Amino acid sequence: MQHPDLDSVLDQTYRALLSGDLRGLARLTAEMETPPDIRVVDHAAAERLRRKAMRNQRLLRAAAQGLRTARGRLAEISAEPALTTYDAKGQKASVGQVAPGQPRRF
């Protein structure tokens, strides 16, 4: 028989990851950090827990990659001039950028 608390924590983590519930994930962190007393007596139950843990691991990796991508994009945006456009050939062009020392015209 599988440990119901571990099974429940894995399912709650899965739902929190899918819904983007960061508060729920923070709450579950304490439960995940304390190893439960697991006494799995059958192979099927152990395999079911392993599949759930692997499923959650894939979601956590995808979420981490999404956060890294978003952080990188935010860094790009903050480094760019205020207005960036694209020409007919798809090339990036900055609007309103003036070289240092060049007078601005309105």
Image (tube, grey):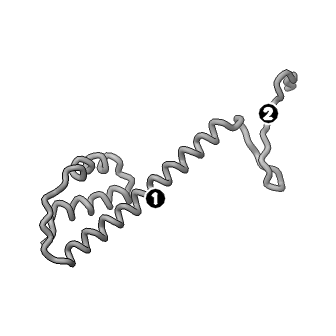
- In the picture of the structure, the residue carrying the numbered disc 1 is 62
Q: Position of residue 84 (x, y in %)?
A: 73, 42
Assign a secondary structure to mark 2: loop
- Viewer-proximal residue among 3 and 40: 40
- Residue at 64% of width from left, 40% of height from top? 77
Specify the label residue 89 is tagged with.
none
- In the picture of the structure, the residue carrying the numbered disc 2 is 96
**Which quadrant of the structure image shows residue 36?**
bottom left
In the depicted structure, whether residue 106 falls above or below residue 50: above
14 on left or right of 40: right
In the depicted structure, whether residue 83 falls above or below residue 92: above
89 on left or right of 2: right
Whether residues under marks 1 and 2 lie with C-beta atoms below 8 angstroms apart, the answer is no
- Viewer-proximal residue among 37 and 24: 37
52 on left or right of 20: left
Q: Quadrant of the N terminus?
A: bottom left
Q: Amino acid at mark 1?
A: Ala
Eye-nearest disc, 1 or 2: 1
